[in-house]
Image: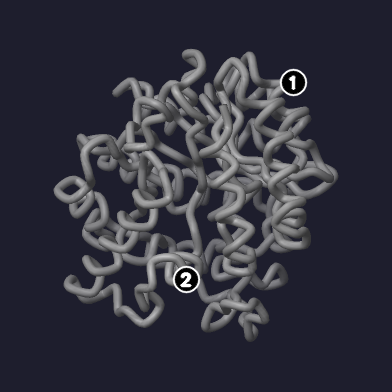
């Protein structure tokens, strides 16, 4: 079995063009603490605003994905992966075995932008406020056979929710719908520019959009709201990818049953990532959607964290038996390789993927 990187293997899966020579791996990204543990590089201590240290980090990224058997590396904008700056962030100590300096999340009760006055004074990013240094480095340094999957800096919905807070956004949808429309336009236009530039790099093999739209039992906003403000932008991002014959991947958490037809038939996604057993196990997702889109990941995060290595191997093998036949499936976690996942469990998941025939 050939384990050398070959992006065409993953592309074949993303476009549902039959079974590849082996099941490829896919992740949105891996937390820096996991990469540290596996590569042995002290990555979290690097200052990524310094070119030399950023390049050291990117070399470790390549090493991590190459040595574990991926056919690609994830690439992001700039050095932090963020474009829209905000101050409505809450922080606390991280309790993971391999902790972040601090764990952060959005203050849902307060927004960086809450009204028209905030909107007008907000420093909306200009082209010179972010860089494509990661893509530039990967363009010159990726091993033969590997490509980049470019992950945008959040989607239109995510960035509105992050900037406003979910509670404030919910009120403004009814009180000031024009403000939501202008927020979507500002964010969407910026993302359109970013995806267009990313699409011009020869080593970029697919575009990926992270835009969480749901929670365990449903979607964050009504289908009508998403159709009015969000899907038209997602469709434009997909069109950018398809203009260069590249696959377009969407990552979204939550129960999206009510909008899956929109995403498949209108937005024209090629693949969907993020599956959770309490919502829709990945084997069921493959059965329901596998003739229309590629299904990615789905090794449930809770299971991956709480069970023994032997239990994980059996669980992963069962997923592969149900999802791999016919192609259109790549193995990975249900979300990301988060810092709280036991490294040995993550590696066991990949090992089962390598063994599977």
Q: Please identify the quarter of the rendering in which residue 114 is found.
A: bottom right
Q: Position of residue 116 (x, y in %)?
A: 54, 61
Q: Is residue 186 visible?
A: yes
Residue that badge 1 annotates: 288
Residue sitting at the far left: 140
Residue that badge 2 annotates: 37
Q: Is residue 127 visible?
A: no
Residue shown at 23% from the left, 74% from the top: 53
Compared with 323, 93 (above or below) is below
Compared with 184, 345 (above or below) is below
Residue shown at 44% from the left, 68% from the top: 85
Disc 2 to disc 1, how far (Cα)? 37 Å
Q: Position of residue 288 (x, y in %)?
A: 74, 20
Q: Does dot 2 land on a helix, a strand or a loop?
A: helix
Q: Does dot 1 land on a helix, a strand or a loop?
A: helix
If you read the primary sequence from the N terminus, does the residue marked by circle 2 or circle 1 appear first? 2
Mark 2, residues whose alpha carbon is within 10 Å: few (<14), some, or many (≥20)? some
Mark 1, residues whose alpha carbon is within 10 Å: few (<14), some, or many (≥20)? few
Foreground residue among 83 and 188? 83
Compared with 80, 274 (above or below) is above
Q: Position of residue 357 (x, y in %)?
A: 56, 26
Q: Please identify the quarter of the rendering in which residue 325 is found.
A: top right
**Left or right, 170 with reference to 264:** right
Q: Position of residue 13 (x, y in %)?
A: 49, 24
Residue shown at 19% from the left, 45% from the top: 139
Foreground residue among 83 and 78? 78
Foreground residue among 174 and 207? 207
Q: Quadrant of the N terminus?
A: top left
Which disc is residue 158 wearing? Answer: none
Q: How many marks?
A: 2
């Amino acid at each position: 079995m050939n384990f050398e990187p070959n992006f065409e293997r993953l592309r074949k899966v993303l476009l549902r063009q039959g079974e590849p020579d082996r099941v490829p791996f896919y992740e949105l990204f891996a937390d820096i603490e996991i990469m540290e543990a596996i590569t042995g590089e002290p990555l979290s201590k690097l200052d990524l605003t310094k070119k030399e240290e950023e390049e050291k980090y990117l070399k470790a990224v390549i090493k991590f994905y190459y040595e574990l058997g991926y056919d690609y590396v994830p690439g992001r904008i700039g050095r932090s992966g963020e474009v829209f700056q905000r101050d409505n962030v809450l922080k606390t100590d991280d309790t993971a075995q391999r902790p972040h300096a601090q764990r952060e999340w959005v203050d849902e009760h307060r927004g960086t932008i809450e009204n028209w006055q905030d909107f007008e004074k907000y420093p909306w990013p200009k082209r010179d406020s972010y860089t494509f240094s990661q893509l530039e480095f990967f363009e010159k340094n990726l091993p033969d056979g590997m490509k980049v999957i470019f992950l945008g800096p959040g989607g239109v919905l995510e960035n509105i929710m992050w900037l406003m807070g979910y509670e404030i956004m919910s009120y403004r949808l009814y009180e000031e719908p024009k403000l939501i429309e202008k927020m979507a336009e500002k964010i969407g236009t910026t993302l359109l520019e970013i995806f267009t530039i990313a699409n011009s790099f020869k080593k970029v093999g697919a575009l990926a959009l992270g835009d969480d739209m749901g929670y365990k039992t449903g979607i964050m906003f009504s289908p009508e709201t998403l159709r009015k403000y969000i899907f038209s932008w997602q469709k434009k991002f997909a069109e950018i990818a398809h203009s260069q014959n590249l696959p377009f991947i969407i990552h979204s958490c939550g129960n999206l049953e009510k909008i899956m037809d929109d995403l498949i038939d209108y937005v024209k996604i090629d693949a969907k990532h993020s599956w959770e057993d309490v919502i829709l196990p990945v084997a069921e997702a493959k059965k329901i959607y596998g003739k229309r889109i590629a299904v990615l990941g789905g090794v449930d995060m809770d299971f991956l964290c709480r069970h023994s290595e032997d239990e994980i191997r059996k669980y992963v093998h069962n997923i592969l038996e149900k999802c791999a036949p016919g192609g259109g499936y790549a193995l990975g976690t249900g979300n990301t390789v988060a810092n709280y996942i036991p490294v040995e469990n993550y590696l066991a998941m990949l090992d089962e993927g390598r063994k599977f025939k």
